Every structure is written in C-alpha cells, then in structure tokens.
Image: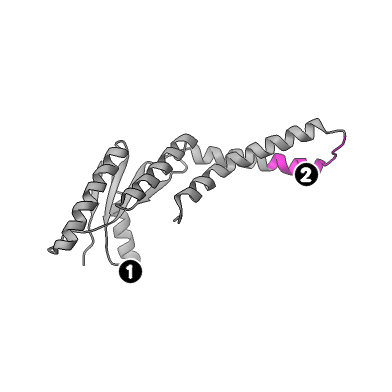
Amino acid sequence: MDCASTGHLIRLLELPGLIDEWLKAFFNLFLKYEHILKMPGFTQELVSISRNLKKLRELLRNPAASALYAVGIPTRMALEETRDLVVACDRMGIAVPLMFLNLLTPPCDCQLCEGLRLRESEVAGEYRKAFPGKQQVQVCRQPGIGGLEQLESLGRILYQPAQQEVAVYAES
C-alpha cells in the first residue's frame, strides 16, 4: 500500500499492539467488577478480537509471510522519514528486506539535470550508509508504465536477486 505519511503508516502498524493493550485493560476491569458487569457476549467478542490481533501481529512479524518494502525519494527529509519507518519496523519485528530509492534523475546531457543528479547521488550515498544491510534498488524517473508487458518487465528488474544496489533506468 502506498502511504501518504510515514507517521500514519507507523501508527497503523502499531495499532494492533495498542488495541491489545486496551483489551487487556478492559479484561482487568471486567475481572475486577465481574459481580457487577455481566456481559458474556461482549467479553467473548473481545476475546475473539484479541485472538485475531495476536494472529495479525504474528503474521506481521513472520518474514516468510509478510514484509514491508520501503520507498523513499532522494531528499534528506525523506531519508529521515525512511529511517524513522525502518526503526519502528525493527522495534515491532516487521521485516524490511528491500528499499526503493525512487524518482532519481537519469543521466543526460543537461547541466541542470546533472547537477540535480549529483545532489541526488549524495543523498543515495547517505541511504546506503544509513541502511548498510538492506538491499536498495534505485529507480530513475520514467514515463508511466503502460500495459501488462511493461509492468512485468519492471517487476523482473526491481525484484532481481539480492544485491547491494541496483540501478533501474527507463527507456525513453
């Protein structure tokens, strides 16, 4: 899923743990006041929600079943947001095996574009330093993908066997 805000994604990923804490608080209240509160259907529903949340958290923590593929752009602010996301995922036990550095300027003869590309390559170097153990794929700006054949071709390029860095350039 493409998330507009890194902070919102982190909160979404933290939500099962937060809800689990709320449920534990409810269960403690229900046990403390069981002689006053008689809601067996409601408590059974909460138990069911708790079990499902546990399954969801186990699924998110199982790298064979799920992973988060981080996508950043070559700016220092995006680097910091990506760093926050990866730290949060590490804390929650969510695998981040691959990162995409998107919207890089491809090589060209334009001086302005080459200056932009130089600045972006410095930020790309900072990404490599910040995430040394993670596979990083660099994706240059390109025209929109049109059709299944182009989409499959891009997928083969982006998800090739693990390397430290792979540059993807679009054909004009």
Mark nearer the N terminus (2 vs 1): 2
Q: Is residue 119 above or below residue 16?
A: below
Label 1 CA crowd tier, 10 Å (few <14, some 14–19, many 20+) = few
49 vs 87, nearest the viewer: 87
Q: In what element is the residue under mark 2?
A: helix
Q: In what element is the residue under mark 1?
A: loop
Where residue 16 sits in the image (x, y, percent)?
58, 42
Left or right, 72 with respect to 35, comes to left
Where residue 19 sits in the image (x, y, percent)?
63, 42
Question: Is residue 162 shown to the viewer in this render?
Answer: no
Question: Is residue 157 shown to the viewer in this render?
Answer: yes
Give the residue type that dot 2 points to: Phe
Give the residue type that dot 1 points to: Gly
Identify the magenta region: 36-48
Image quadrant where one finds the C terminus: bottom left
Where residue 7 sits in the image (x, y, percent)?
48, 48
Q: Is residue 151 above or below residue 36?
A: below
- Residue 42 shows which numbered tag? 2
Q: Residue at x 31, y 39 (%)?
A: 130
Left or right, 57 with respect to 45, comes to left
Left or right, 58 with respect to 68, comes to right
The residue wearing badge 1 is 146
Q: Is residue 34 above or below residue 150?
A: above
- Residue 132 shows which numbered tag? none
